[in-house]
Image: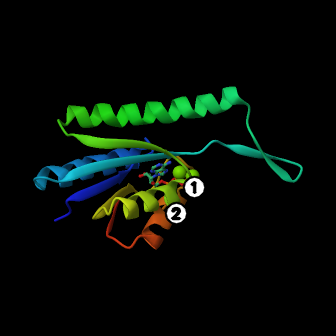
Amino acid sequence: LFSKILLAYDGSKAANKALDRAVELAKVTPGSSLHVVHAFEFPRFFIGEALAPLPASVNKDYYDLAVQTTEEVKRRLADEGLNAKVELLQGAPAETILKYAKDQAVDVIVIGSRGLGGIREFVLGSVSHNVVQSARIPVLVVK
Ligand code: ATP
Ligand code: MG
Ligand code: MG
């Protein structure tokens, strides 16, 4: 069975369904560990040719939102009586998830099919697409 489980979490509806499944997996596997990764990036915008950071106050809002998202997932896991490691990591989501999976040698990645983005005509979002494409381990995509 999968003893080291990585949940990719962005606070979306599909990510919350993925959380339920990750919790189930963790509960049926004695001695397993659940790791949750929420990746966040500071947005940047173009001025002429250069990519510029946004003002500090805006960046703080993004950071606060990311912290809120991890607190949400911590609350949900506490309700389940599950002890998990929740990580807030800076970086592009797919790369960050894949790097964490590799560094921590996890056995399975649990991820939502879609996230907070918009275009519903595709089954997968760009993050779930890239993770499924590049992961060397099983990925459970939850719809
Ligand atoms: P897009 O981002 O391409 O506009 P989307 O938001 O609908 O599309 P994804 O971002 O691919 O879809 O989200 C699919 C799943 O990937 C989410 O349910 C979540 O499990 C994971 N995910 C997305 N963003 C992050 C993130 N920043 N940190 C951790 N996991 C994430
Ligand atoms: Mg997204
Ligand atoms: Mg996106």
- Per the image, label 2 sits on a secondary structure element best described as loop
Q: Is mark 2 within 8 Å of ligand 1?
A: no
- Quarter of the image containing the N terminus? bottom left
- Asked whether residue 142 is in view, the answer is no
Can you name the residue that lies furthest to the top here?
57
Rendering quarter of residue 41: top right
Q: At label 1, which amino acid type do we have?
A: Ile
Above or below 45: residue 125 = below
Q: Which residue is mark 1?
A: 119
In percent of width and height, residue 66 lies at 50, 36
Can you name the residue that lies furthest to the front here?
103
Q: Which mark is residue 63?
A: none
Q: Which residue is mark 2?
A: 122
In percent of width and height, residue 113 lies at 42, 58
Q: Residue at x 38, y 56 (%)?
A: 111
Residue in front for this viewpoint, 80 or 91: 91
Q: Is mark 1 within 8 Å of ligand 1?
A: yes
